Amino acid sequence: MTGTRLDARRPKDLVFTLFGEYLLGRTESVWVGSLIALLAPFGLTDGGVRTVLSRMAKKGWLTATRSGRHSFYSLTPRGRRLLEEGQARIFRPPTPGAWDGRWLLLAYSIPEDDRRLRDRLRDRLAWLGFGSIGNGLWISPHDVLAEVEEVARSLGLEDRYVGFSARRVGGEPLAGLVARCWDLGALAQGYRDFTVRWTPVLQQAMHQPLTPEESFTRRFDLIHEYRGFPLLDPGLPRELLPTPWSGDLAADTFRRLHDALVGPADAHVSRILDAAPGAGVRPPVRP
């Protein structure tokens, strides 16, 4: 069973998955009772849901509104941007063309005692597909200088880094350099494990359609697990990947199963939302 993989996940992650996969396109705030009902299959209690929603609102991810005795939640612009970016990485991943052999080399200087800022920068660079050579040097085969400049501005580091467009000359073999900068072995194994775990579910869905509620929980679990890959996969050009690349089969399995589950899962969510008090006249999502 795949559902058990959710048990150790943080409640905040489950809420983000729910909003990102099922509620991102909704134009109304969502009644807290509906959120409780939708998250109950994943081990969250009534009180647990209310607590995590309140905390996420205080941190600026959600907005809370009231209508009479009822509380409603919607994404803030910040929360929406985060989830839209994540959904784009999952469903519209970049497809780099033939690589021209050039690298973007980045060097930065941040004091060791400012660990929080260093960690935030490293996380953002990894999200952009950079790999670390060591000693504050990062490389990427992608032309993402504009994105780096935006990251630097957001963190106040405009004058703390320097970037170069470069070609590799000599040194260790290219495969060794890639292996030193990115743990493709672990990533490939993760993709293989994902495919092994979800192929039987895909086969079942193809031959015996699941109920709307089963489709909802399966799709939730599926997206909740798969959305971790964009955080780990640098999206390297084909020239830098092992052949065959297990990420291809994992992506195909994900897309086929996701497509099979979308209709009935959305029907289940709509049924839950339509049962909310004042359905259709709830507070609108704030722009």
Image (spheres, grey):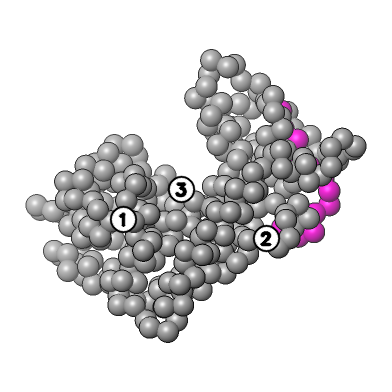
Q: Residues within 10 Å of mark 1 (few under 14, many from 20)?
A: some
Q: Is residue 106 magenta?
A: yes
Q: Is residue 198 above or below residue 35?
A: below
For image coordinates 60% across by 40% down, the residue present is 126
Q: Which mark is residue 82?
A: 3
**Sequence-wise, which precedes: disc 1 or disc 3?**
3
Q: Tell me where residue 174 appears, x and y as whole percent.
A: 81, 44
Residue furthest bottom as drawn: 207
Name which residue type carries label 1. Answer: Val
For image coordinates 47% across by 66% down, the residue present is 198
Q: Nearer the viewer, mark 3 or mark 2?
A: 2
Q: Tell me where residue 177 appears, x and y as whole percent.
A: 77, 40
Q: How many marks?
A: 3
Mark 2 → mark 1, Cα distance in angstroms: 41 Å
Q: Residues within 10 Å of mark 3 (few under 14, many from 20)?
A: some
Q: Is residue 214 visible?
A: yes
Which element is circle 1 on?
loop
**Sequence-wise, which precedes: disc 3 or disc 2?**
3
Q: Nearer the viewer, residue 123 or 151?
A: 123
The segment highlighted magenta reads 96-107
Name which residue type carries label 2. Answer: Trp
Name which residue type carries label 3. Answer: Leu
Q: Nearer the viewer, residue 208 or 29?
A: 208
For image coordinates 44% across by 52% down, the residue present is 83
Q: Nearer the viewer, residue 138 or 273?
A: 138
Which element is circle 2 on?
loop
For image coordinates 34% across by 78% down, the residue present is 210
Q: Which mark is residue 172?
A: none
Q: Which residue is mark 2?
A: 245
Mark 3 → mark 2, Cα distance in angstroms: 28 Å
